[in-house]
Amino acid sequence: MSHLERLAAHHAAALLRFERENREWFARSVPDRGDGYFTGFDARHADLLAEQATGGCHFHVLVDDDGAVLGRFNLVDVADGAAELGYRVAERVAGRGVATDGVRRVCALARDGYGLTRLTADTTLDNAGSLAVLRRTGFTPVGEVSLGGRPGLRHVRELTADD
């Protein structure tokens, strides 16, 4: 069983492990975070928690019963009832519906917990898994974007009471 939890200080070690273990996997579909991300992880984690406290972002981890991070589901740039969704899941659970389930959960939380009415999400054209997740969770493509120099699509989902 998995639990979607708001990012907290006690997630730091498990989150760093998740990012290290999946670095090569993530780099296949999204720009690599770079070595500085890992060497400065503790400060970065503290910065994220401080940013979250302002209400401008809502960071979440999907954890298993042992506390291992299975994925990250983040709402950033929160303003005027909208936010941008970003997510990533561990290679070991990819293709098992974990990303779809996590996106559904965070969409419901965005609507019911944070009062948001609209989410956007971007993904590269060569990330078939992410494109499928967005399609399955009610996002609609609305335009082309460039992500780290790679072609991508921007998606939008309106969050309505009847979801």
Image (cartoon, helix red, strand yellow):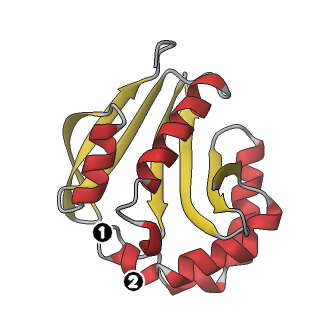
Q: Is residue 115 above or below residue 67?
A: above
**Residue type (three-letter) at the residue carrying disc 2:** Glu
Q: Name the residue under label 2.
A: 24
**What residue do we see at 33% from left, 31% from top?**
138
C-alpha span from label 1 to label 2: 10 Å
Q: Nearer the viewer, residue 77 or 7?
A: 7
Report x, y in % for residue 40: 66, 80
Q: Residue furthest top?
A: 161
In the figure, residue 17 lies in which quadrant?
Answer: bottom right
In the figure, residue 156 lies in which quadrant?
Answer: top left
Q: Mark 1 points at which residue?
A: 29
Mark 2 is surrounded, within 10 Å at the Cα level, by few (under 14), some (14 to 19) or many (20 or more) other residues, namely few
Quadrant in which the N terminus appears: bottom right
Report x, y in % for residue 122: 32, 48
Q: Nearer the viewer, residue 66 or 19?
A: 66
Q: Is mark 2 on a helix, strand or loop?
A: helix
Report x, y in % for residue 125: 18, 56
Report x, y in % for residue 135: 27, 39
